[in-house]
């Protein structure tokens, strides 16, 4: 397991280093224009990485089994944090959504932490209820009601992307834990018309779908962002235009350092650079899956699967949105994009993966 941990550490550090360079490259011009400090976002990004690294190092030293004792308190605290976004003066509205809270001069997104809390809670619940896991009343309904309530809170913010991520990971953990497939399929089928209604009856979501299908119908409106992303990726060619030489980051591509940082990577580092990031993310999932496969108990296995599936799915959605393969969802590219809460939560997740791996090593001795 030491070899797996070493590989995972190198992969995460590589992604973080790429992120540091690309966040500065993608944000320097806009940061100087708006904040009169070209390193404004870079400084915050480094601070978030430092906080995440400290928390990850702490979590790594703790036996992951102790998380079972505090699984419910962690979930409760994360739900309270999500509710705080609706409190005037505490919650911050950015780009029309209430997803953030202001704390000590920093802006945090509670949904990033509730995602991790849900994974810990489900891993604990599903591993404890082995004997009644196939029961609808005792094995399926209780966690589904809790997860469903959290999803509703996220949709009110609104944060459809995070809600979809949590729902998908919950279904995956249900399947791995052995919940009756009929229960999973039934709720999935029930969710389809609900998801359709949430998209078709909300104007901006409907416009995003239309832009995804044909962005050229409204090139200066809802299709603008994805078209600029196409231009960035297409301009990069095989080797890119050169680090720092992107034109699309010069106020053409919105959210260049967050949601669409992959497009800037493709423009500046080319197809080879973009494929390098894809390879690192794939290797992250692969090495994390090895930790899950070697976990000595079902709690550790489910916990590891939940963590790497969350990170892998968000990477897939982000890259899919940047390339036009999926509608835009506003999810950051894990370990790479600017986004403090995501960086901190993902690094804590990595710390838990290391804890699972280290504990298994001790057991093997």
Image: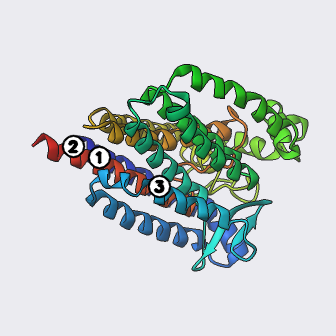
Q: Residue furthest left?
A: 365
Where is residue 213 drawn, in percent x and y? 80, 30
Residue at numbered disc 3: 72
Residue at numbered disc 1: 356
Specify whether 332 is left or right of 62.
Answer: right
Which colour style is shown? rainbow
Q: Residue at x 77, y 41 (%)?
A: 227
Do callouts 3 and 2 mark residues in contact (Cβ within 8 Å)? Answer: no
Relative to residue 82, is residue 312 depicted above or below?
above
Report the front residue among 76 and 157: 76
Where is residue 312 drawn, in percent x and y? 50, 39
Specify whether 148 is left or right of 70.
Answer: right
Q: Residue furthest top?
A: 182
Residue at numbered disc 2: 360
Is residue 109 among the parts visible in the rendering? no
Q: Residue at x 72, y 59 (%)?
A: 250
Where is residue 134 drawn, in percent x and y? 48, 25
Q: Tag 1, which secondary structure?
A: helix
Do callouts 2 and 1 mark residues in contact (Cβ within 8 Å)? Answer: yes
Specify whether 241 is left or right of 55.
Answer: right
Report the front residue among 250 and 327: 327
Q: Tag 2, which secondary structure?
A: helix
Do callouts 3 and 1 mark residues in contact (Cβ within 8 Å)? Answer: no
């Amino acid at each position: 397991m030491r070899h797996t941990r070493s590989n995972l550490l190198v992969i995460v550090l590589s992604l973080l280093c790429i992120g540091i360079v690309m966040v500065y490259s993608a944000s320097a011009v806009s940061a100087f224009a708006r904040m009169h400090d070209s390193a404004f976002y870079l400084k915050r990004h480094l601070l978030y990485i430092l906080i995440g690294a400290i928390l990850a190092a702490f979590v790594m030293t703790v036996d992951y089994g102790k998380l079972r004792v505090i699984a419910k308190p962690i979930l409760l605290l994360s739900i309270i944090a999500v509710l705080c976004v609706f409190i005037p003066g505490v919650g911050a509205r950015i780009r029309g959504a209430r997803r953030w809270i202001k704390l000590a001069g920093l802006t945090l997104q509670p949904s990033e932490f509730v995602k991790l809390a849900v994974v810990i809670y489900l891993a604990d619940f599903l591993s404890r209820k082995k004997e009644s896991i196939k029961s609808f009343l005792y094995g399926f309904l209780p966690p589904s009601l809790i997860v469903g309530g959290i999803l509703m809170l996220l949709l009110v913010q609104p944060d459809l992307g995070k809600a979809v991520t949590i729902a998908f990971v919950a279904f995956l953990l249900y399947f791995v834990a052995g919940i009756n497939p009929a229960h999973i399929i039934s709720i999935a089928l029930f969710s389809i018309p609900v998801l359709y209604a949430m998209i078709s009856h909300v104007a901006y979501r409907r416009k995003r779908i239309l832009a995804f299908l044909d962005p050229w119908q409204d090139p200066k409106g809802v299709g603008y962002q994805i078209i600029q992303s196409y231009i960035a990726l297409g301009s990069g060619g095989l080797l890119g235009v050169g680090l720092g030489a992107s034109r699309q980051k010069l106020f053409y591509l919105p959210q260049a350092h967050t949601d669409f940082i992959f497009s800037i990577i493709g423009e500046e580092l080319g197809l080879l650079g973009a494929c390098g990031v894809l390879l690192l993310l794939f290797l992250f999932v692969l090495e994390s899956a090895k930790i899950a496969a070697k976990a000595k108990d079902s709690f550790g296995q489910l916990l590891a699967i939940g963590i790497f599936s969350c990170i892998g799915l968000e990477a897939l959605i982000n890259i899919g949105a940047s390339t036009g393969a999926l509608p835009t969802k506003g999810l950051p590219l894990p370990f790479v994009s600017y986004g403090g809460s995501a960086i901190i939560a993902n690094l804590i997740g990595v710390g838990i993966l290391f804890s699972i791996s280290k504990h298994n090593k001790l057991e093997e001795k």
